[in-house]
Image (tube, grey):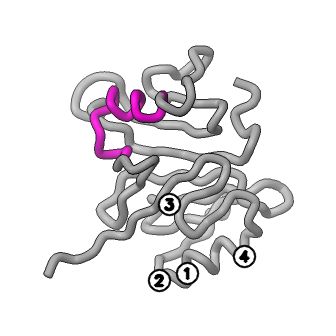
């Protein structure tokens, strides 16, 4: 029998898996811990780290979840609108998200990152050429207005 892989559905303006944007820090932490996932608190930022840092939750000054970032991991699959987004070729991933909103051409890191302000969603990769550029390494979802200034 094959081991099951956890899947987290990324929902713009809602959250990822059991963690919802706007959720209190202790509630978000409890939701992940209830699933049996490792936890570490970043002492340098208002951020909780799960799945060996592959699932990160960032908090605002009121300790409410404002941004969730998932990195490619053997522990889980990040799903966006039915697509395993971090396993798609980068151009296909951009096209998959562009079906729902356009990315910002004003992004100074365009190519490495694609930001979709209407969804407050981002894709990031460490390079634009070579093996590291084939797929995106992270997908992030922010609260409404997270990317309003872009």
Q: Quadrant of the N terminus?
A: bottom left
Label 4 neighbour load within 10 Å: few <14, some 14-19, many 20+: few
Residue underneath mark 2: 36
Q: CA distance from mark 3 to mark 1?
A: 12 Å
Location of mark 3 (residue): 55
| Structural distance between the alpha carbons of marks 2 and 3 | 13 Å
Residue in the foreground of this view, choosing between 141 and 47: 141
* Horizontal arrangement in the rendering, residue 41 relative to residue 54 (left or right): right
Label 4 sits on residue: 26
Q: Which residues are magenta?
A: 85-98
Mark 3 or mark 1: which comes first in sequence?
1
Q: Residue at x 37, y 34 (%)?
A: 93
Dot 3, crowdedness within 10 Å: few (<14), some or many (≥20)?
many
For image coordinates 34% across by 67% down, the residue present is: 75
Give the x, y percent position of residue 139: 48, 45
Q: Label 2, label 1: how many angstroms apart (C-alpha)?
A: 5 Å
**Disc 2 on helix, strand or loop?**
loop
Label 4, label 3: how far apart the Cα atoms are: 16 Å
Q: Which residue is mark 1?
A: 33
Q: Is residue 51 above or below residue 99?
A: below
The residue most toward the top is 105
- Left or right of 68 on screen, residue 70: left
Residue 77's x, y, as percent? 36, 58
Q: CA distance from mark 4 to mark 2?
A: 15 Å
Tell me, yes or no, whether the two marked residues, 2 and 1, touch with CB atoms within 8 Å.
yes
């Amino acid at each position: 029998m094959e081991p099951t892989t956890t899947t987290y559905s990324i929902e713009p303006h809602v959250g990822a898996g059991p963690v919802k944007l706007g959720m209190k820090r202790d509630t978000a932490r409890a939701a992940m811990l209830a699933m049996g996932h490792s936890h570490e608190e970043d002492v340098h930022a208002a951020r909780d780290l799960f799945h060996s840092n592959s699932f990160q939750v960032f908090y605002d000054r009121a300790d409410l979840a404002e941004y969730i970032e998932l990195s490619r991991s053997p522990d889980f699959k990040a799903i966006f609108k039915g697509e395993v987004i971090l396993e798609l070729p980068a151009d296909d991933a951009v096209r998959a998200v562009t079906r729902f909103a356009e990315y910002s051409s004003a992004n100074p890191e365009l190519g490495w990152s694609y930001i979709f302000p209407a969804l407050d969603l981002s894709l990031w990769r460490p390079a634009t050429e070579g093996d590291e550029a084939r797929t995106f390494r992270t997908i992030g979802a922010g609260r409404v207005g997270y990317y309003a200034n872009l």
